[in-house]
Image (spheres, rainbow, N blue to C red):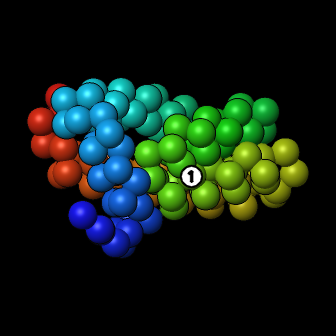
Amino acid sequence: MTEVASHSGIDLNVLAGLESRLGRTSMVGLVTAHLRHSQVVCDRLLAMTAALDRKELHAIGHQIVGSCGSIGLVALSQLGGTLEDEARQAPVEALRAIIDATLNACREAQSVLRARYPEVAA
């Protein structure tokens, strides 16, 4: 089954490929774990809006790249890469804009994943 990338920057072919290899039950487990982890990451990013920690932002960006790219969350992975690359030297306002974009992409990805895998525990 060939699918196109969703408007949210998610490569649905990657999700479908993973599901065909892992099976639905394992995929639901993977998505559940990803959603839990992404909530922790979002909470850490929200905490950064008041007082930026550049080293922490760099680490968060790196985590996003690894955890999101492997399951087809392309836009979110790219934003994580931008955050990782810019964390050390970008102006504070630029970092806040990247954080906002990352949080928005994370919420969108969570929404798409929950719609695609409704059996994921809330």
The secondary structure type at the circle numbered 1 is helix
Asked whether 82 or 96 is in front, the reply is 82
Give the left or right position of residue 56, taking residue 70 as reference.
Answer: right
* Position of residue 20 measured from the top left corner of the image (x, y, whole percent): 27, 44
Q: Does residue 96 show up?
A: no
Mark 1 — residue? Answer: 77
**Which quadrant, please, contains the N terminus?**
bottom left
Which residue sits at x=34%, y=31%?
30
Which residue sits at x=12%, y=36%?
119
Asked whether 81 or 91 is in front, the reply is 81
| Quarter assignment of residue 71 | top left
**Amino acid marked by disc 1:** Ser
* Position of residue 88 measured from the top left corner of the image (x, y, whole percent): 84, 45
Which residue sits at x=81%, y=57%?
91
Q: Does residue 33 show up?
A: yes
* Position of residue 86 measured from the top left corner of the image (x, y, whole percent): 78, 53
* Position of residue 78 measured from the top left corner of the image (x, y, whole percent): 61, 58
Give the left or right position of residue 75, taking residue 84 as reference.
Answer: left
